[in-house]
Image (spheres, helix red, strand yellow):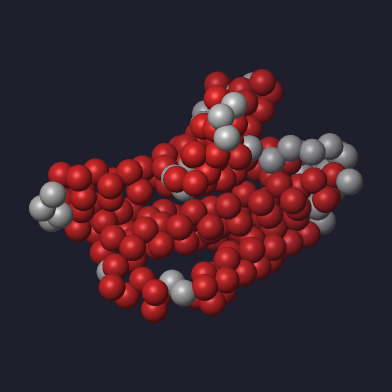
């Protein structure tokens, strides 16, 4: 049970990060190369990228959990960096640390891609002559940028904070912030940009259909 919990925790978090990176590419193409959007991001391309994100998350989580739980550990669940502190196997610990370094490089690569994409997006938006056009473009990017910022900042704080400020309640709160809140916000934020959905929610709340 503990193994499954750790597997799905890492799987959903890694897949979420990969999907956020793909969403950033979607906004880059939509704003910087709008005439090529249909070619670069057709339905088949979107399906392939989504499948690649989920497959990469699956392989990544499988590798992490298989390696982590090969170590002698007590039976409970928490995040993998916390589990490693309890390891009694020096060689296994070093092996997992190496895997975490590779993971950090991968995460940093996605982060650099997101930053580079948004630099290009903001440069393109600032060249739009009309204020209304700039506002529309910025409003398209703001929800995604908010979710990415929340996900990345809380994840970095969770894994890099000083041990002196660590506590079970703080660790749980920060973990919930980056593991539960961003995925929960995704459908809400992106769906509310749909005018038909907003109209339906307004009618439901006011009782006028």
Residue 97 x, y percent position in the rendering: 62, 53
Decide which of 190, 80 is in the foreground and name it.
190
The image quarter in which residue 63 lies: bottom right
Residue 209 appears at what percent x and percent y?
57, 35
Q: How many marks?
A: 0
In this rendered view, identify the residue nearer to me: 119 or 201.
Answer: 201
Task: Give the answer, above or below, for where 129 lies relative to 204.
Answer: below
Q: Quadrant of residue 109?
A: bottom left
Residue 148 showing in the rendered view: no
Q: Look at 63% across and 32% down and name the residue there.
A: 176
Residue 72, image x and y in percent?
A: 84, 48
Q: Position of residue 114 (x, y in %)?
A: 38, 55
Please tell me which residue is depicted at 37% across the width and 58% down the height of the picture.
27
Question: Looking at the image, can residue 79 be seen?
Answer: yes
The extreme front residue here reads 209
- In the image: residue 167, left or right of residue 40: right
Q: Is residue 130 above or below residue 78?
A: below
Horizontal side, residue 64 vs residue 14: left or right? right
- Residue at 82% x, 56% y: name it: 70
115 w.r.t. 154: above or below: below
Residue drawn 83% across the image and 50% down it: 3
* Left/right of residue 2 with respect to residue 199 in the rendered view: right
């Amino acid at each position: 049970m503990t193994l499954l919990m750790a597997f799905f925790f890492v799987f959903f978090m890694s897949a979420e990060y990969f999907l956020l990176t793909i969403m950033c590419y979607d906004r880059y193409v939509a704003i910087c190369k709008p005439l090529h959007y249909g070619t670069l991001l057709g339905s088949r391309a979107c399906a392939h990228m989504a499948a690649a994100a989920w497959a990469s998350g699956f392989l990544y989580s499988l590798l992490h959990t298989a390696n982590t739980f090969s170590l002698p550990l007590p039976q409970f669940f928490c995040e993998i960096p916390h589990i490693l502190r309890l390891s009694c196997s020096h060689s296994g610990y070093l092996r997992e640390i190496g895997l975490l370094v590779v993971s950090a490089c991968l995460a940093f690569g996605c982060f650099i891609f997101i930053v580079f994409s948004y630099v290009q997006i903001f440069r393109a938006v600032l060249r739009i002559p009309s204020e209304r056009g700039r506002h529309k473009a910025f409003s398209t990017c703001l929800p995604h940028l908010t979710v990415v910022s929340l996900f990345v900042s809380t994840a970095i704080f969770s894994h890099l904070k000083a041990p002196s400020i660590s506590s079970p309640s703080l660790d749980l709160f920060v973990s919930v912030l980056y593991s539960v809140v961003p995925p929960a916000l995704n459908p809400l934020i992106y769906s509310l940009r749909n005018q038909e959905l907003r109209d339906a929610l307004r009618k439901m709340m006011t009782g006028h259909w």
